Amino acid sequence: MRGVTPAAEADPSDQSQSLRALLRRLWAGVCRYKGMVVAMVVFGFLEAAFTKLPFVLVKPLMAELAGEPAAPAPLPGGNDPGVAEQLATDFNVWFRGFAEQLAHTLGYTFDHPGMNVVVACGIVAVLCGLLGAVTIYFVQTISRLFAIRIVADLRAELARHFLALPVRFYGRRRMGELISKVTNDTQVMQRSFELASDNVVVDPLMIVFNIAILAWFVPQALLVLVVMVPAMVIPLYRQGRRVSKRSSKSLQAMGETTESLNQILTGIRTVKSFQLEAAMLRDFEATTRTFLDRVFHMLRAKGRSMAQTFVGYQVGFGILLVLLGYVVLVDKQVRFDDVTLVIMPLSTTYQHVKRLTRSYHVLMESAGALRGIEAILHEPVDEAATGGRPIATVRGEIELRDVHFAYGDEPVLRGLSLHIPAGRTVALVGESGSGKTTTVDLIQRFHDPQQGSILVDGVDLRELRLADYRAHTAVVSQQSFLFNTTIRANIEFGKPGATMTEIEAAARAANIHDFIASLPQGYDTVVGERGGNLSGGQQQRLAIARAIVRDPAILFLDEATSALDSENERAVQKALDAVRRGRTSIVIAHRLSTIVGADLIVVLEKGRVVEVGTHEQLFAGNGVYRRMFDAYSTGSVA
């Protein structure tokens, strides 16, 4: 049973690179959706303004409740009012006039003239609330849409890159981990961006407005921010690096968990047949425990950061209390009613820094998630898919010249040479590991020879445009993959845009039209996941129809009947005999009875051609093929 591999410690330089990569992507998103970003900033500014404006109302309200005169007056102790106090008093005078004009306009009067200021404060606060609600709606909607678009673009980039990667890439990666990158990792990034996008825009503006209020009314209180902000930001940075590292580890563990579940679901028949439920469950639970442990460490890093930020705020708040007491009681530079005005902005500053702290943490989580995604995006694409000579037609003549190929250090083909005339059916036979499937993969150009060459119609396959070449080829494998869509769509995948007449003609040639016509929904019947609503023989004939509608010059048949019973094999074989006519067909078969009519049979052994001929020639030769056929006929081999 597969164990859980511990994640390696994240290198600090890797974390910095991940953060830079994240910032580059964010900047690219800003440039791509600059209209949305401008709208976010504008509405964010308005939201901050409408949120903080009610704080300013405290000054005229407190002055009115204290019965202060409208004209400037000396501060206690005989000191002349400073610039800040003069501005504050001027604002009180202006607001009192505004309140009287508003009362006159709306037509209300009070016995106590101070009620005009009180009511005006209430009306302005309500208006700020209504307008602020509108701006919040737009900020929240636009910022989240911006975040979703960035992640959607990343998923689309991943999908394009997956399709551009060579087949060998998938041979060394687990599907569950790749799926986890597209789903779990990008979902972490989406949640992070959704949370961070509006906070990163709005909360700094909120802090700026708080600073402006303090600078206007009580500039001495700005000294508190000199202590408070560094005390909150320093632990934010320190713990943020840990959050990024823990996030990368937890997402790696999530990939292990997804892969474990993928193994259970894709192999459910085998699991149940061999009673592996308990073993598979233990494996899944082990990966889940690892995931939970790593998430716990990430949450601890977040918790420490929040706690240390709070301590920094409380230290600053304590200093503020002492400072206010001094300037009111001793220095007498601030009026008592200004104390409330000072406390309100500074108390909300903590909430804004707290949200920025969370935003920084989730961005560091995104950096950890992006690390694995970037690793995939830096995988080299299939160079064979680009460039090459365009071709309009393919006759189907194939020649392999001294072809060598190895997977890693294990050689598979050792100087394979073979000529396949156009329009002929050639069967490749041999023991497992002899190189049959590798030969077919090379002719399909899933890989390139490490030595030697493959020629199609006399031209090296590496010189041809791959898309043009594959447009003239089709494959039917032992377990042909069907998409979870309709029968019509599955056949049409062989020739996008095929007419219904062409689809039906291909189905008839594959001996499956009558079955399709008998279904209640006919060609609109959904085949199910991997064709699960069809029998094995029906799946194969549907795959053959998909190949027929393509009208390929070269057809690859990779043990297309080996998984079928005798009745289905006869039906499928009849369809295959029809589709092979007039085109080059390369057949891999273990059931030697299915290829006795091949134009040419090639016997492979340890990556080399050891015999070539027709069935009659090889059978009479009393060589490797004869021994294989005799063993097959007597049931000694499958």
Image (spheres, helix red, strand yellow):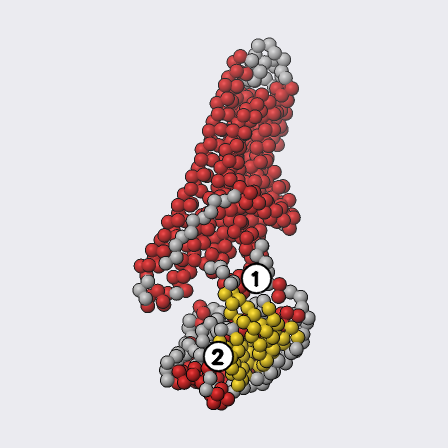
Pointer 1 local density, CA inside 10 Å: few below 14, some 14–19, many at least 20: some
553 in relation to 364, above or below = below
Return the x and y of residue 609 as percentages of the image width and height. 53, 78
For the residue marked with disc 2, what is the amino acid? Answer: Val
**Which dot, 2 or 1, sits closer to the camera?**
2
For the residue marked with disc 1, what is the amino acid? Answer: Leu
Visible residue check, residue 119: no
- Total number of numbered discs in the rendering: 2
Visible residue check, residue 397: yes
Pointer 2 local density, CA inside 10 Å: few below 14, some 14–19, many at least 20: many
Look at 57% across and 55% down and name the residue there.
377
Return the x and y of residue 65 as percentages of the image width and height. 52, 21
Look at 61% across and 11% down and name the residue there.
79
- Which residue is disc 2 drawn over? 429
Residue 176's label in the rendered image is none
Look at 45% across and 69% down and name the residue there.
530
Q: Depth check: 387 or 244 in front?
A: 387
Return the x and y of residue 220 as percentages of the image width and height. 58, 21
Within the image, what quadrant is residue 568 found in? bottom left
Residue at the top extreme, as displayed: 78
Quadrant that contains the N terminus: bottom left
Left/right of residue 613 with respect to residue 281 in the rendered view: right
Residue 165's label in the rendered image is 1
Look at 49% across and 51% down and name the residue there.
185
Quadrant that contains the C terminus: bottom left
Q: How far is disc 2 from disc 1 in space, using C-alphas? A: 30 Å
93 in relation to 241, above or below = above
Return the x and y of residue 62 as percentages of the image width and height. 53, 22
Q: Depth check: 10 or 115 in front?
A: 10
Q: Depth check: 511 or 77 in front?
A: 511
Instruction: Give whichever of discs 2 and 1 has the lower sequence position.
Output: 1
Left/right of residue 635 with respect to residue 156 in the rendered view: left
